[in-house]
Amino acid sequence: MKFRTLVVVALAAAVPALACAKKPKKVGEDVPVKQVAAPVVEEADPEITEECIMNVSLFHEAVKNKMFADAYEPWYEVYTTCPNANKSIYSDGTKIVEALYQATKDQAEKDRLAKLAIEMQDKRIRFFGNDSKYPKPYILGEKGLAYVDFYGEAKYAEARECLRASAEGLGRNSKIMVLVKLVDVSYALYKQDPDKRAEQFIADYEIASSALGEQASMPENKNADIAAKQKDYVDNIFAISGAADCSKLDEIYAAVVKENASNLDMLQKIAKLYRRVRCTESEVYFAACESAHKLHPTAESAAGCASMSAKKGDYAQAVSYYDEAIKLATIEDEMEDVADYQYNAAVYCFANLKRYQDARKYALASIATLSSLGMSKGQGRCYIIIGMCYASSRPYGDDAKGRILNKSVYWAAVDKFVKAKQVDPSVEATANEYINSYSRYYPTKEERFDLPNEFSGSTFYVGGWIGESTAIR
């Protein structure tokens, strides 16, 4: 046995010696170098011992009782020796580190705990990044929140990267606080450098607001009310930021729309953003909608084309586009937008095309849509449009009798103005103004006396396309 060992050792020692004894290369002669890839060695997961399992139970129980100082030692033992033992290492660990951070006044200890809070999320990604319930994007959100909580503005850039990655990865399933902090942090960075950070802030706001909007509209979501309130908050942040200025948006997105004329997803996102901030008179918005509509017609793109047509003075085409938008709207679209499409079509039919009967049809449709949503606000403006259509009509001809009978439309018109302020107090001032104006044109007693057959009784049926009964007054 000893002899065989000696032989093997001798042979092993002889190999390099023989290699060195080869004829050397001449000066200037190329010496080929063989590249050998370093072997990939995957680090094995730490062993989960009985002691680890016992310590998990100890710190978990301590955390449940809010005894964070007592929890730290068994937690840290598990965290350093078997970090793959249980997900509670990280969910409880976040609570432990945060509690100890708040409790200590020692800056060095605060710095250590802050560093540990970030490191903890990286380790969680390594061992539990594929978890079905809390995958890597969720953990990145926790890391972003940790940057905000422990470092504040000093690490906003790092926080924003993590929060954005989380929001992109989870979409409407994102943690509400992650979405809110994404906007907060991005807004703070934008204020530091508006020229450089405007596009980034707008994009971050868009993804956060959209996700919160979806969460708020999900009936099965128990946090829908919270999501709705937080959406209002981020919308307000965006509104006051200055980034929502239409000219600012145009500077950012004019070139983007041109470069993405065939990118439907990008065009739709830009069009939706412009509608949200009410920059629908922008040529950039029109261009995005027109290009998107050619690729794949949607309610959003059709509505954009309607605005573009109206701006060009082609109101008939605008109404046609709104018809298309209404038909293309699905349950995924906000029905409030459909009510707006119907109202806008009513306005153009009344004010620009003098198609009063069509205007009433669209206004009534808008009222029905808002009623289905349980919304009274918005209905008042529709009743006012109907009243204006009635007041502008002459259903009885232009002879002496007709001129008197035509005044009956003012009774019907005032009925609608009264209805407007009853269902929607926000239009009361406007409705009262129209009531005062048009009530002066009612048929006089003398005129009614001249037509006793027509004005007998207490009610009058207004004929023509109006076709409604109204009280004589």
Image (cartoon, rainbow, N blue to C red):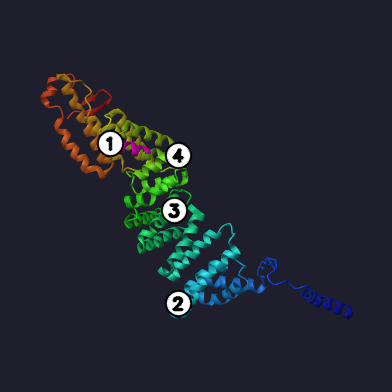
Q: Nearer the viewer, residue 290 or 116?
A: 290
Across and down, in percent, residue 125 comes to 57, 64
251 to the left or right of 77: left
Frontmost of labels 4 and 1 is 4
19 to the left or right of 229: right
N-term mark: 3 or 1: 3
Across and down, in percent, residue 181 comes to 42, 61
Tag 4 and tag 1, C-beta contact below 8 Å: no
What residue range appears in magenta? 305-312
Badge 4 element: loop
Name the residue beneath numbered marker 1: 383
Predominant SS of the magenta segment = helix
Q: Tell me which amino acid carries mark 1.
A: Tyr
Q: Which numbered circle lies on residue 207?
A: 3
Q: Tell me which amino acid carries mark 3.
A: Ile
N-term mark: 2 or 4: 2
